[in-house]
Amino acid sequence: MTHVFHGVDEFRAATGLDLGAGDWFEITQDRIDSFADVTEDWQWIHVDRERAAASDVGSTVAHGYLTLSLIPRLSSELFTFQGIGRAINYGLDKVRFPSFVRPGDRIRAVGRVAWTREAQAGGVLACVHYVIEVEGREKPACIAEALMVAFPPEG
């Protein structure tokens, strides 16, 4: 179930809040290929199915940055805001990619609000700790601390 933060004060008080896990989301080779085209990162391990299949990895794998870039999509199932002006990305800390994501794998986000602090203009800076799990695997695909700022409504 998606947690709804009603205003910046509720978000400010969320340190330590477990946001739970979202739904599974399948990664396809088409998505991997599209990401390669957008980023112009056509390394063979991502896009050359035959070469990747013959390698010690055994198949193509998603770019780590593709997995990372899906955090906004995956986290939308964990939490949302009502009664704020806007929320913006502020950066990332401690990003790691412990295991591969292969075409056909399903991933999901598990989140926790690690900490919150005061920000400019009455906003709240928060660090949300994400673990991007791969269905059926012990090791996650990605672990990241995402920083965001939520601002109160203007006016």
Image (cartoon, rainbow, N blue to C red):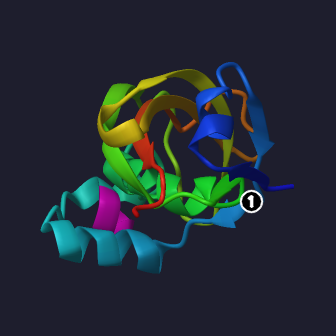
In the figure, residue 114 lies in which quadrant?
top right
The residue at 54%/57% (across/down) is 84
Q: Which residue is mark 1?
A: 24
Estimate the x, y position of residue 124 in percent, counting from the top left: 46, 34
Q: Would residue 17 be counted in the magenta stretch?
A: no
Position above or below: 38 against 2: below
In percent of width and height, residue 129 lies at 55, 28
Under mark 1, the amino acid is Trp
Evaluate whether residue 147 shows in this view. yes
The boundaries of the magenta stretch are 46-51
Magenta part, dominant SS: helix
Looking at the image, residue 44 sits to the left or right of residue 61; the answer is left
**Residue 38 to residue 120: above or below:** below
31 relative to 75 in the view: left or right: left
Between residue 3 and residue 52, name the one nearer to us.
3
Q: Residue at x 74, y 59 (%)?
A: 24
Q: Residue at x 48, y 51 (%)?
A: 152
Label count reads 1
Residue 98 is situated, as x and y percent measured from the top left of the image, at 48, 27
